[in-house]
Amino acid sequence: MVLLKSEIVLKTGDKAPEFNLLGIDDKKHSLSEFKEQPTLIVFMCNHCPYVQAKVTAMNEIYEKFKGRLSMIGINSNDPTNYPDDSFDSMKKFAKEKGIKFTYLVDETQEVAKKYGAVCTPDPFLFDGDKKLVFHGRIDNAMKPEDSPTEKTMISNVEKLLAGKKIENDFDPSMGCSIKWKSQQT
C-alpha cells in the first residue's frame, strides 16, 4: 500500500472534465447527465482501507443531500493485480456497503488523470456549473482507525448550497495510491 495525499491539478474554478463511463447498473453515465446541480465526484475503490473507513460518511453525504447534490464514485484502479477492484467486485461492494450513489469504472484511467486524482478516496466538489469549489477530504479522520471530529465535506456542501464561499478550497485527502496500469504516461 502506497499512502498519498491528493494533489492539485484542477484548480478552483476549473470546469470538471467530461466522461462517459460504465456504472454498476450496467449503463453508461456522463457528467452532462448531472445537470445544473452541485456534484461530488469521489475517486474510490473497493479494497482500500481508507475508502472502507469512509463508506459510511459517503453514504451519509448522499442521504443528507439527495435531490440537491449529485454524487458519483469512480474506480480507476487496475484490477489486474487488485481483483477486489474488478467491475463485478464493485457491484458486490456497493451492495454490501449500501452504496446508492452512482458508482462508475474508469477502465482506461484517463478520467483519473484528467482530474489529477492520485489516491482513494480523492473527492472533488463542483458547483451547479461544474466548476471546482473544493478538492479534499471527507472529514478530518486521516487514518482508517481514526474517528472524525469534523465533517469537512458536509460542511462544504452546506456552504455551497447556501451560496456561501468555501474558504479553504483545498484540504488534501489521504489514502492508498490509485493502482495505475504499468504503462502510465
Image: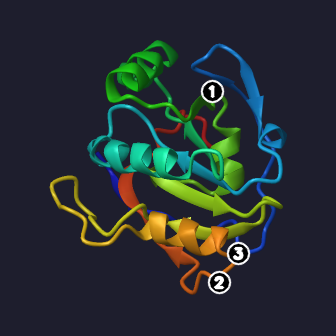
Above or below, 179 against 173 in this view is above
> Colour scheme in the image?
rainbow
Instruction: Tell me if residue 8 can be seen.
Output: no
Left or right, 1 with respect to 34, comes to left
Can you tell which of label 1 and label 2 is closer to the viewer? 2
Which label was assigned to residue 165? 2
Above or below, 179 against 107 in this view is below
Image coords of residue 12 (percent x, y): 70, 75
The span from disc 2 to disc 3 (Cα, nearest Å) is: 12 Å
Which label was assigned to residue 12? 3
Left or right, 116 with respect to 4, comes to right
Q: Amino acid at mark 1?
A: Glu
Image coords of residue 114 (percent x, y): 72, 51
Structural crowding at the residue carrying mark 1, measured as other residues with C-alpha within 10 Å and reported as few (<14), some (14–19) or many (≥20): some
Q: Residue at x 50, y 31 (%)?
A: 100
Please say if the residues under marks 1 and 2 sit with CB atoms less than 8 Å apart.
no
Q: Amino acid at mark 2?
A: Lys
Above or below, 95 against 21 in this view is above
Above or below, 23 against 120 in this view is above
Image coords of residue 110 (percent x, y): 70, 40
Q: Amino acid at mark 3?
A: Thr
Image coords of residue 10 (percent x, y): 70, 66
Q: Could you tell me which secondary element the residue under label 3 belongs to?
A: loop
Which label was assigned to residue 107? 1
Q: Could you tell me which secondary element the residue under label 2 belongs to?
A: loop
Q: Could you tell me which secondary element the residue under label 1 belongs to?
A: loop
Which label was assigned to residue 179? none
Residue farthest along the bottom direction in this orientation: 167
Say which quadrant the N terminus sits in.
Answer: top left
